[in-house]
Image (cartoon, rainbow, N blue to C red):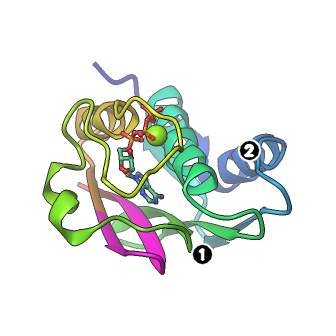
């Protein structure tokens, strides 16, 4: 089960960015921004960190050495949204429906290593927190993962 606490999402985002910037490939840059003047959220910090680290790890892994990875958090009246966007290899349309299945990997990953478990675990963690995960991707153009937590 999830353990909810109040924490500052903007500070959380800054910390993860600093940690993940040490693990990028080549000249990749992780660019973080927080949108909205509100910064407090009530979520499971450990589950959220694990999820965001997984998404950024994928963005690093599946994009080139000069990639700019955009990490954004937003809090508005109704919801908290967390986005990770890259301009890497993308996910083929025909593979997209299986993306959250355990051990599934898309057909364009070539020699990039992975077990296909990361997103399956992320999806379960987001669901434990009552959130939603969606994505949008075009091969060789861009991939955007979005986590959405609606306020109740
Ligand atoms: P690991 O278990 O080590 O995370 P993985 O990265 O292969 O292995 P997932 O994170 O579950 O597994 O991702 C599943 C598949 O989704 C990947 O194998 C890849 O095909 C595709 N994928 C995920 N994120 C991206 C991304 N940002 N760009 C392109 N493809 C992606
Ligand atoms: Mg992964």
Bin the neighbour count of mark 2 within 10 Å (Cα to Cα): few under 14, some 14-19, many 20 and up. Answer: some
Residue at the location (16% across, 65% down)? 94
What element does badge 2 sit on?
helix
Numbered tag placed on residue 20 in the rendering? 2
74 and 123: which is toward the camera? 123
Q: Earlier in the sequence, mark 2 or mark 1?
A: 2
Rendered location of residue 55, percent (x, y): 50, 49
Is residue 43 depicted above or below 62 in this figure? above
152 and 15: which is toward the camera? 15
- Horizontally, is 66 left or right of 109 in the view? right
Identify the magenta region. Answer: 135-147
Numbered tag placed on residue 48 in the rendering? none
- Horizontally, is 69 left or right of 87 in the view? right
What element does badge 1 sit on?
strand
Residue at the location (40% across, 34% down)? 118
- Horizontally, is 97 left or right of 19 in the view? left
Q: Nearer the viewer, mark 2 or mark 1?
A: 2
Query: In this rendering, does residue 124 appear at all?
Result: yes
Q: Which residue is situated farthest in the top direction here?
A: 1
């Amino acid at each position: 089960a999830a353990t909810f606490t109040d924490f500052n999402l903007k500070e959380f985002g800054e910390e993860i960015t600093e940690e993940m910037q040490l693990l990028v490939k080549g000249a990749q840059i992780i660019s973080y921004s927080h949108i909205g003047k509100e910064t407090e959220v009530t979520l499971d910090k450990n589950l959220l960190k694990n999820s965001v680290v997984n998404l950024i790890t994928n963005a690093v892994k599946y994009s080139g050495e000069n990639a700019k990875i955009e990490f954004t958090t937003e809090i508005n009246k109704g919801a908290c949204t967390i986005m990770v966007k890259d301009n890497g290899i993308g996910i083929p349309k025909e593979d997209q429906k299986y993306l959250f299945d355990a051990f599934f990997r898309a057909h364009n990953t070539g020699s990039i290593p992975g077990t296909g478990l990361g997103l399956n675990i992320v999806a379960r963690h987001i669901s434990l927190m009552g959130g939603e995960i969606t994505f949008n991707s075009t091969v060789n153009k861009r991939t955007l993962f979005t986590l959405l937590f609606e306020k109740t």
